[in-house]
Image (cartoon, rainbow, N blue to C red):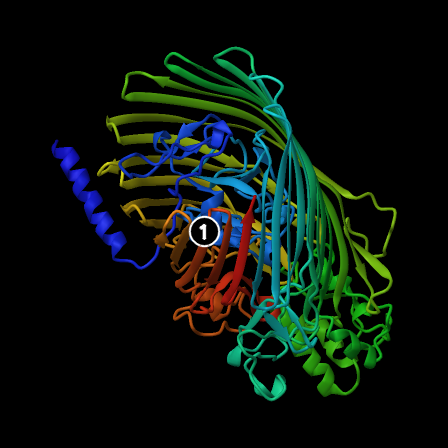
Amino acid sequence: MTKLHLMGGCALVAMSMAWSVPALAQDSTPVSPTPAPSTEAVAEQDSGGLGDIVVTAQKRAQNLQDVPAAISAINAEALQARGITETSDLMGAIPSLQVTTPYGRTQPNFALRGISVANEFSASTASPVGVYVDEVYQSFRASHGQQLYDIDRVEVLRGPQGTLYGRNTTGGAISFFTRKPELSGYNGYVTVGYGNYDTKTAQAAVEATLVPDTLGIRIAGTWAKGDGWQYNPAQNRHVGTTDSVGGRISLRWKPSDRLDVNLKLYVATDKPLGANAYGMGQLDGGRDALGYSRFDPAQNGGRALGRDEVAANTGGTLYTNSKGVALNISYELTDNLTVTSITGYDKGKYRNAPTDCDGSPNDLCSIRYYSESENFNQDLRFNYSGGKFDIVAGLYYGKDTVKTTNEPDFFGVLRPLLLSLGVPGNSNNAAIGTPDAIRYIPGFLANPALRPGDAGFCDRIEINPNGFLDARSLVALQTDIALNNSGGGGFGGAYSAACRTAGAPPFGPILGRQRYDVQRPSKAIYGDVTWKATDRLTVAVGLRYTWDQVNYLNGSTILYDLSGTTPVANLIPYSQTYNPNLAPLEQREKANRLTGRANISYEFADDIMGYAQFSRGYRSGSFNGLAYQGTNQVYYIKPEKVNAYEGGLKMRFFDRRVQLNLAGFYYDYANHQVTQVVGATTFTRSANGRLYGGEAELSVKALDNLRFDAALGLLNSKYQGNVLNPADPSSPTRNVNGNPFPNAPSTTFTAGFEWDVVDTGKHKVTLRGDTSYMGKYYFDPFGDYGQSPCDRPGAPGNIRPAGTGITCGNPGYWLFNGRLTYELDKKFSVSVWGKNLTNKYYYTYGLNIDVFGLDYLNRGMPRTYGVEASMKF
């Protein structure tokens, strides 16, 4: 009794804390009843308490409070009540979940408990948070944000899921379940909306039962179009627009009680004008490498740019398309044994053409990304439930291929300058563009007018002993340009002096085309056994063995001449003179891994359960695919591995009117994959570290018409135990030991309330309010870059200087959302809603690209608001 009184007292304290905050929304919202057994929720108790939530996180239907793990679930009604219409909205509804993106809604990066893809921006990189739609793994990150409509529920599993979900789930797993035909009559809905920025939305679904209890079809679609929230004075247009459409057809055939077949076909397209990144200069006055500052009125039409403005000379459409088919066949072999086959095939396209990576009206940095994916997944699963045992076992095979073409276009501003100075259009920048030739170049390339025997001629010139273009090369470039201009005699004097002083050659734009494919076949065998040792004690053990292969295929990079029209050199594989017949670069690696879990749980009372768990997860290895300058930059990064220790309590009190779930965890993390931009090249690194923290989730049904929810996440992350090799000039990096993980805020908090202000049965008015807090975090693993105090610009010439937007970290921020809904006869409703009501200015993504002297920062959405009407039938 003493323990129960203590726990009850803790619950009362937590409840009073929740009542002290103005708003709330979290995962314990009961899932509304649906005919599908896996999503059916028990109605709220006669006492008026909280209802049960049924999830399938462990590949079988279970009450959420009975699952000994940190799991959250949101159903369709809760998604609508909270205005969750895109993946970024989940960030304020799920504990310890963060959603960032380098390219708007088209490519979300999920982070759970500080584990994420970090600042990686390649579409070919797999996320360490697995994303599943109707149990089909979605490997192509660019399409992760395209299926959040006509959803039955969303389940979020925090922590490694190496047993039942497999690879690429070191952070956890997010599962979306779309609505399937109920096989009973006809139903549907239509929802239309209008918001600021002239944004128009529509979503609809219709379901028909062709044969009662046997055959049904459901058709759903979504559409949205709107003007942009960001103005680009350099192009005189608004960007950050909305332009998406999607459709889905679901067929269900249930010829008997034992056989259930579900077939789904879908297609979606998103093609907005992408919002431009904010280029915050790293040099004095917020200036970049060319001296531009968005804060300088003289450079921006006589005024500093507003916070909704970016002057970018390039920038285009973010195009994403996905389509696919999924087939789920479930058959009950016996009363205790069910076999399920889950088959998925999908294709995706991603085009970002072009993106402006300097946020300025100068042609300093732009790049075009093109990626296509093709994915196949097959999972054959057996479920046994009988006596004291629940067993899940299966076989998995998957293969995904991402074909990528990137077109870097750096320092294009120099093209007209050099041509005007008489530099031939067929000259090239191969000496700067590749580490295979960068240390020395032939002397005549520095000054073609000089020949052997001439005064000032030298056989070779050392231009960059470090092997790639970095900030120091840029400083040398700027110095040499000044020397050339002051000498008045063209390039001869300066570059003749380079023979003695290791200067630079005539530096020109880097314009190239990079191609490569990443192919990842994977197969696995797994099993998970849950044993009900006593009425209160349960033990579960699971193992999975995975055979993984990562192939880098068809790798090539070519460099164009100064005119930008003729290929002049191969960088990967290398040839100083362009050779179209060079065989492409290919590399293959294998990695076999054993993952699993051991879990023990105990019911201290009917509504109080505690658990302890050890689990191991891993993320497959990768190649440094974005590197384009030389073969030595295309290397293999070993797989990530995490050993996770977790314990928790799941409790209900006061006739189930109060629900409090607690979890604590410790992660031992190896080979965490992160991105470092050095000069104009991207490198994937890996580092070891540890994380620990805790979470609390609270739901309170204070009155029959008033409900509160809240969630708190605390996290401490640190890199440690890493060994650096400063003698290796090909991979310079700062010491990350002691720094926190990127995208790992120490504190996250969400809270909200839902109040039925009026409920007569026929008429209902509901007010929903939510708030969320995202604590301070860093965008990359290098912390403050050793700059103390952090609010000073990096010194030119240092390796990887960074601006204050990177070195000082992303400050913590609060967001507030609200929604007021009137409902008539449970069939018609009108809502007025607002997001980011205080119009908070905050960033969601950052990248240090020091060679251009700037921090690349993406801003979160400003205040949006609108009205929405829905009709059910």
For residue 263, what is the image quadrant? top right
> Number of marks in the image?
1
**Residue 422 location, x and y as percent?**
85, 79
Locate residue 710 relative to residue 347 in the image: left or right: left
Residue 124 is at least partly visible in this image:
yes
Tell me the amino acid under the disc marked 1: Ala
At a point 30% along the width and 36% down the height, the residue shown is: 648
Q: In the displayed structure, does residue 544 sit left or right of residue 441?
A: left
Work out which quarter of the rendered image holds the C terminus and state it: top right
Q: In the depicted view, which residue is nearer to us: 135 or 685?
A: 135
Given residues 568 and 169, the one toward you in this image is 169
Residue located beneath label 1 in the image: 81
x and y percentages locating residue 107 in the rendered image: 60, 52
Task: Determine whether 517 is above or below 442 in the image.
Answer: above
Q: In this view, does 60 lie above or below 752?
A: above
At 43% across and 38% down in the image, what residue appears?
31
| Side of 51 relative to 17 (left or right) | right
42, 827: nearer the viewer: 827
Q: Which of 73 and 415 is in front in this view?
A: 73
Local packing at callout 1 (Cα closer than 10 Å; few below 14, some 14-19, many 20+) is: many
In the image, residue 768 sits, relative to residue 485, either above or below, namely above
- Estimate the x, y position of residue 732 in percent, counting from the top left: 55, 56
Task: For residue 162, say whether it is visible.
Answer: no
The location of residue 54, given as percent across then percent down, is 42, 32
Q: In which quarter of the image is the N terminus?
A: top left
Q: In which quarter of the image is residue 668?
A: top left
Q: Which residue is drawn at 37% across and 50% down?
A: 760
Determine the secondary structure under disc 1.
helix
Q: In which quarter of the image is residue 699?
A: top left
Looking at the image, residue 566 lies above or below residue 448: above
